[in-house]
Amino acid sequence: MRRTTRIGRRQGFSLIEAAVATAIIGIGVVALLAAIRAGTHTNEGGRKLTQAVFLA
């Protein structure tokens, strides 16, 4: 009979570790997309303000 050692069972990632890593990456991507959207909105407001100043 073969004995399973602790080292043999610890190789690789478990499903829970992979799920946690995926969740962390997903949260980071969502935060990045929100920051990009906010920056785009701010940039659009600045463009409109600049155009209004030039037209005044």
Image: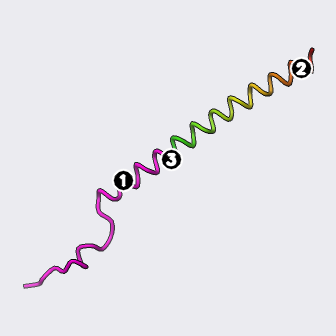
Q: CA distance from mark 1 to mark 3?
A: 12 Å
Mark 2: give few (<14), some (14-19) or many (20+) Cα within 10 Å.
few
For marks 1 and 3, the one nearer the N-term is 1
Q: Position of residue 43 (x, y in %)?
A: 74, 31
Q: Position of residue 9 (x, y in %)?
A: 23, 73
Tell me the chief SS of the magenta region. Answer: helix
Q: Is residue 12 magenta?
A: yes
In the picture, the disc for residue 28 is: 3
Residue at the spot of label 2: 53
Q: Which image quarter holds the N terminus?
A: bottom left
Q: Is residue 44 magenta?
A: no
For marks 3 and 2, the one nearer the N-term is 3
Give the magenta part as a residue range. Answer: 1-27
Mark 1 in CB contact with mark 2 (< 8 angstroms): no
Q: Is residue 50 left or right of residue 17?
A: right
| Residue type highlighted by circle 3 | Gly
